[in-house]
Amino acid sequence: MQAGLVEAFPALPRYTNESLDFYFHHYKTYVSHIALPFSSNIMSGWFLRTALGQPALVETVLLMSAGCLASHLIMVDASIQRTRRTIQDTLQLRSRTLKSLQNLLLHPSTCFSEETLLVIALLMCVEGAQADFESVDAHIVGLQHVITRLGGLEKISLQTLSILYCCDAMQGLNRNSPPTFKISRRWATWIRNNSACLTESPYPSPQSLGKRFFNALWFGDLPSDLIKIIRVFGKLISIHERMIRESCSERT
């Protein structure tokens, strides 16, 4: 994601008001940390290496970046000209991404691939953020078909599953509904063995957080799975507050 990275994608012409380097930089600096708050650098690096062989994924990255920036500009009441330019870029990138997806679906070699699955999942996330639930439903059907042809969730790479589950959770939040896809046992094992929230977290929960709750006489009678979930949420609160403090200190 360094400056000049766009040169790695010579097939992509300049078709936006802002430079492609600008949107790549915005993705690295802001969007990747929002979309992938845990191990964002590792996941973003893997995602870009995967995108090197599939321009449609690059356009999806640019679309997420432009869409996120457009939403931010609207919320902060930025200048009309700046906001309009970014919205135009978002619409242009959305159109190109949909066209690239259609091209992927036309070729047997790319129709049922993890790259196509990633493009559909990320598009579903973008459409959900815009409350286009009809498109979200269509993307879910497409994802289910691709997953079936790939041999099921257990046959898909762990990194691809991470992005799929993230997008699925976000579309569920937008619609106030549970996620669509079941959790892969292989992925769940990987998360349990590697997640800082489930093992030794670098951000331990403050001793005062839920102290009386955890020390209650009846706490030990709760189901073990529920106790584990409660402790995980305690660590998540601690991580969230730590990230906010670090973000504020960086800005000052």
Image (spheres, rainbow, N blue to C red):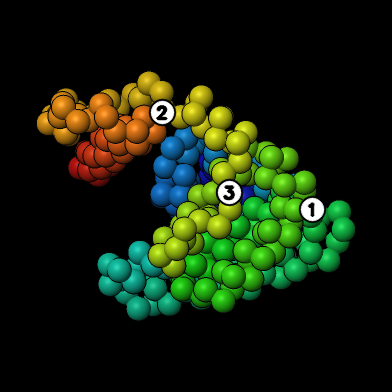
Label disc, if present, on residue 198 of the rendered structure: 2
SS for callout 1 = helix
* Image location (x, y in percent) of residue 50: 68, 43
Snapshot quadrant of residue 190 = top right
Please say if 36 is above or below 62. above
From mark 2 to mark 3, how far is it between C-alphas? 20 Å
Q: Quick check: 238 left or right of 155?
A: left
Going from the N terminus, do you reach mark 2 or mark 3 first? 3
Between 63 and 126, the one nearer to me in the picture:
126
Q: Is residue 182 above or below residue 66?
A: above
Q: Residues within 10 Å of mark 2 (few under 14, many from 20)?
A: some
Mark 1 closeness class: few <14, some 14–19, many ≥20 residues within 10 Å: few
Q: Earlier in the sequence, mark 3 or mark 1?
A: 1
Cα–Cα span, label 1 and label 2: 32 Å
The reply to whether residue 72 is in sight is: yes
**Residue occupying the point 71% across, 70% down:** 99
SS at badge 2: loop
Q: Position of residue 163 (x, y in %)?
A: 56, 47
Label ID, residue 182: 3
